[in-house]
Image (spheres, rainbow, N blue to C red):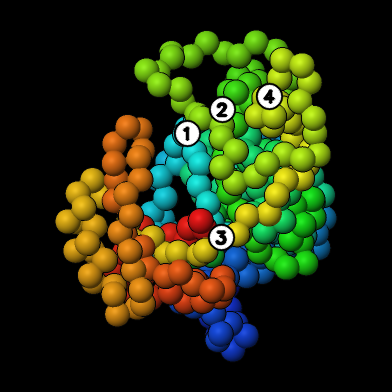
């Protein structure tokens, strides 16, 4: 969501007058929030000046398919990619009026009343299923923006999406984010043809080179659909995959714990050595997981009882030098 280079003057003013109100934030939250406020103030100043001169022009959308180059925010590097295997858990947040009417990262115009999302690395547009693990609500969402840049947040949903998923008032939720490969491929094909629909039809998929193994395995690991009945010849998972953007499926809430993951390693000894550097922060564990036929060893500390506690723990892990650490929910 950082879409403009800011003047030194604006940055200095906000550093002077904004610190008092942000004193309770962690260091990375502070950096992200300060940058967001500076950006907003700079944009409002420019808009006011152009309006005074009578030169204000409406924002013109220029949508495009986009992956993007690696970029750095608050000292952390992000590497955008076309990832048709994406399946992660974490904490979701939402954003609204502060960016209404402005361009998204792929050149569309952001409308907080449309179901959409911002993600740090996924290609745009792409389609993901976001499941609120706390209430079982599941929503198909179109990704067309970059963010969120507060540490420990996995996806930023529009206000409309947050309402549908049932966490608008709370502000955050424990979620699972799964890319829908077929819908994303259709979105990509249409975008490269200059078309940017909110949902996709059942037209043929673009040709792709098949992998040795399926690119994505749609599983019911976290939710069980209860509001739809499979039609003859279609499983519940087929119905999930075919769901259109903005449609909600209500499933079963999932009991979860919040962990801070320092990293995942091919060698168990390396994982334990890394965990040893963070044991003073609390309990830790090394657990194996099978990824693409290979065993990885995850080094984690926790579990945290609340998101606020996890945020503080993540900030402490960052201070140890583990810039790739993240919050995971299981």
**CB of mark 4 within 8 Å of CB of mark 1?**
no
- The residue that label 2 is drawn on is 181
Q: Nearer the viewer, mark 4 or mark 1?
A: 4
Residue 272 appears left or right of 262: left
In the picture of the structure, the residue carrying the numbered disc 3 is: 256
**Residue 56 pos. (x, y %):** 78, 52
Counting residues from the N terminus, which is met first, the one under dot 1 or under dot 2?
Answer: 1
Task: Give the residue at mark 4.
Answer: 235
Q: Secondary structure at mark 4?
A: loop
Structural crowding at the residue carrying mark 3, measured as other residues with C-alpha within 10 Å and reported as few (<14), some (14–19) or many (≥20): some
> Across the whole image, how many numbered discs are drawn on residues?
4
The residue closer to the viewer here, 288 or 84, is 288
In the image, 68 versus 321, the foreground residue is 321
- Relative to 321, does residue 227 appear above or below in the rendering? above
Report if residue 125 is visible in the image. Answer: no
Residue position for label 1? 85
Secondary structure beneath dot 3 equals: loop
**180 on left or right of 289:** right
Q: Which one is in front in this view, the residue at disc 1 or the one at disc 3?
A: 3
- The answer to whether one can see residue 204 in this image is yes
């Amino acid at each position: 969501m950082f879409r403009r280079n800011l003047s030194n003057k604006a940055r200095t003013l906000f550093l002077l007058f904004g610190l008092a109100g942000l004193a309770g934030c962690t260091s990375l939250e502070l950096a992200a929030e300060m940058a967001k406020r500076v950006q907003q103030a700079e944009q409002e100043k420019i808009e006011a000046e152009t309006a005074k001169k009578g030169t204000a022009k409406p924002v013109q959308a220029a949508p495009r398919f986009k992956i993007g180059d690696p970029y750095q925010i608050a000292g952390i590097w992000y590497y955008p990619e076309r990832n048709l295997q994406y399946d992660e858990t974490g904490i979701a947040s939402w954003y609204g009026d502060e960016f209404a009417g402005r361009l998204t990262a792929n050149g569309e115009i952001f409308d907080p009343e449309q179901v959409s999302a911002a993600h740090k690395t996924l290609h745009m547009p792409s389609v993901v299923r976001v499941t609120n693990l706390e209430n079982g609500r599941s929503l198909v969402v179109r990704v067309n923006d970059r963010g969120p840049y507060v540490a420990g947040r996995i996806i930023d949903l529009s206000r409309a999406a947050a309402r549908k998923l049932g966490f608008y008032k709370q502000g955050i939720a424990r979620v699972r984010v799964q890319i829908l490969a077929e819908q994303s491929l259709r979105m990509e094909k249409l975008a490269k043809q200059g078309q940017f629909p909110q949902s996709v039809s059942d037209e043929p998929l673009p040709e792709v080179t098949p992998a040795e193994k399926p690119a994505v395995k749609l599983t019911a690991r976290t939710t069980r659909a209860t509001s739809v009945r499979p039609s003859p010849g279609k499983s519940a998972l087929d119905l999930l995959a075919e769901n259109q953007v903005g449609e909600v499926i209500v499933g079963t809430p999932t009991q979860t714990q919040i962990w801070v993951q320092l990293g995942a390693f091919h060698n168990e000894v390396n994982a334990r050595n890394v965990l040893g550097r963070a044991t003073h922060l609390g309990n830790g564990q090394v657990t194996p997981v099978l990824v693409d036929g290979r065993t990885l060893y995850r080094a984690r500390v926790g579990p945290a009882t609340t998101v606020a506690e996890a945020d503080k723990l993540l900030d402490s892990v960052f201070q140890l030098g583990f810039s790739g650490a993240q919050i995971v929910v299981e």
